[in-house]
Image: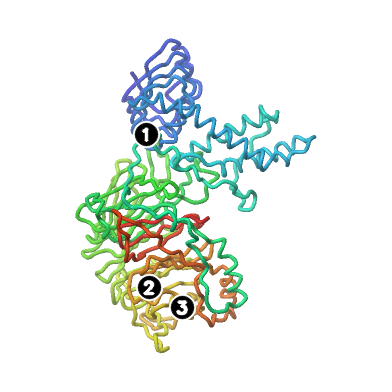
Amino acid sequence: SLSKLQLKTGDLDPRLFSRLRHLQKLDLSDNLLDKFPNSLTLPDLRVLNCNNNKLEDVTALKQFPLLEELTYENNVYLTLNDDYKVMFLLENLRLLNGKDITKLANHVRRVNSRKLTSKVTAHWEKFFRDQLPEKYTAEQVKSIKKKFLKSVQTNVVYGPSSLSEFTRWRVKMIAEEFLAYSLGLDLNTDPEPEEKMDENEEESTESPKEAAEEVDQVGDFSSYINNVTVTPSKRKRNNSKPRSGNKRSKSQANTEEEAEDVSAEPLHFLQCHSKGNSREDFKTQLWSCVFEPLLDCGARKDPIVSSSRTVATCGGESVCLIDCETGTVLKKYKVATEEFFSVAWTTLTMVISDSRKKSHNILAAAGRRGIVKLIHVAADYCYGEIKAHKKPIATVCFSPTQETHLFTASYDKRIALWDIGIPDCDYNFKASQLLVLEALSIPLRIALVPTCPDQYLLAGCEDGCVAWNIKLDKEQKSRPFEAIFQFPDEDGAMTTSHRVDGLAFLNDDVIVSKSSKPGCIYLWSWSRSFDTKGKGCQRTVSAVILAELEWSTTDLSYLTLSTCPARGHVFCGDETGSVWMYNLSNYTTAWSSAKGKRSDKRIPPTQILKWPELRANGEQLTEVLINNVVSDPTFTYLVVLTSVNITAIWKKS
């Protein structure tokens, strides 16, 4: 037993341990180990306890081939993927963290390996076999190996996405063996550093149809929706027909042709925010969702994936983390007396032991009680709260440049800027208020200006669209707004007084806002509307409008919009359960030129995704409002939040 000795990896001296030829049981629990040295040997080791350490990788455990019992609970960096890796690597393993894994381990080693091998082989046959000439040079071998390994890890998908890291690890292993044995390709070429995949280098070839195939093998996946069904005929129909209507200009016609590129299919409908987990709850309103940022985890950084599949959603008393591919609710946080309105992610570099820094995703959630909850997701731990306002918080967002800076917009007609601090290894942290922005009405949506996120913040409020100077070198802690924007009203006159319940940047300059005029969403220019050199506070400024988007004529409020800047898309749901999608990539170049003229006609949606026929307890769900629609940064998934406690996930097909 070497438990509770503050041991670090360097303390495990291979020269000493390699002499322990007959050691069968080793307890290294409650230490500071971040990995195992590769040459401890211990040829007869049967039982190993590594609980409560800081292990980041398990592959070095393959040096203990006779291991039968292994425990490594409370190592925060180890995931389900690591469980599967040790099951594959240790053929004699019976107990993992106290559970009998014999049956599952056999499945992982045999069935999983067999299926992945057939997929890897098929991928080579279909896309790469003909690329290799009969007589090939070492350089050609090196090139095709590199392309094949990159392509096969991207496109061979199997099992739930929570196991995607394990799957790619196995696929790479199988692909290398395949090249070495089946084809006789020499693998002893110089290893190259893994690069990010060029977008056009390989076409995606397989969609993850089998993604949910092995969910029952994985363990405790909670299924939160059993009583909502999609009528098959409705689901199979084309839910994404381009909208027909008036004649289009040439650029609009191009947009129409791209409509096929945007078509999406419904993937999952989840009822995971129910009050008291009730299956009868079709009333809880869902308000906000944000995709988790990808972590740059050094050696564990994923070279293949460029966008996260995990989304945080909030509504009612709970916040959920959902895997969009499988529809699995990965985690759920509940506060019985709260109604959550907004969630936001940041990535903090936290110092663990040995002064080692690591990146961790932190989720902030806030709502009716005016309190911000701070959650360290990987550790399943809500480590703190900030009593930010005495009235409800409508929305929160983090600064893209200062990871600890959080803006909270409240019904008290103020927007506060907080420094949430960085928690230490015991989760002690110190939050401080840096700034208070005074609004004339309740701020509903906030957006930092992409070209100067440390200087200007925009807010869509109950009674107008307003901008503040938020530069922290000014001494004034409480600030009035710097400008209020005026827009055309229904009669064509300019007005500052209107509810702005949708606000987002489409790119560095173009703002999308939804406000006064029924059936209309405005696109307007920040740089042409707002003169940053202008003097004086509370000045009225006319928004320089670039275009109008055609939208529902409803007068219902708080159906908000979102953008996908990388793809030039705008999304907005309506009062009938439909999602209006606008592909504006053909327009943005013209708008960015100095002489960019306003588009005279309203731009119609590229597509409208219709709400499918859902039945709950045999009855059709009606009167579905779409409160929010958000895509991931690469527009693979579209998450739709409704007024009837249903989270709908669509996938771009």
Residue 468 disc label? 2
Q: Is residue 192 left or right of residue 91?
A: right
Is the residue marked by circle 1 packed among few (<14), some (14-19), or many (20+) residues within 10 Å? some
- Secondary structure state at the residue bearing disc 1: loop
Q: Residues within 10 Å of mark 2 (few under 14, many from 20)?
A: many
Horizontal side, residue 341 vs residue 311: left or right? left
Q: Which residue carries the number 1 mark?
A: 75
- CA separation in Å, label 3 and label 2: 11 Å
Please tell me which residue lies in front, 412 or 252. Answer: 252
Q: Are marks 3 and 1 in contact (CB under 8 Å)?
A: no
Badges 1 and 2: C-beta atoms under 8 Å apart? Answer: no
Front one among 301 and 233? 233
Q: Which residue matches tag 3? A: 530
- Above-or-below relation of 212 to 530: above
Q: Is residue 541 above or below residue 295?
A: below
Farthest residue to the right: give it: 135
Instruction: Looking at the picture, tell me which residue is in the foreground, 584 or 275.
Output: 275
Residue 232, quarter of picture: bottom left
- Residue 264 position in % (x across, y down): 49, 58
Task: Inspect the image, locate mark 1, and give the three-letter code of the amino acid beneath it.
Answer: Asn
Q: Which is nearer the N-term, disc 3 or disc 1?
A: 1
User: Which residue lies at the image location 28% right of the left edge and 67% below the top edge?
Assistant: 410
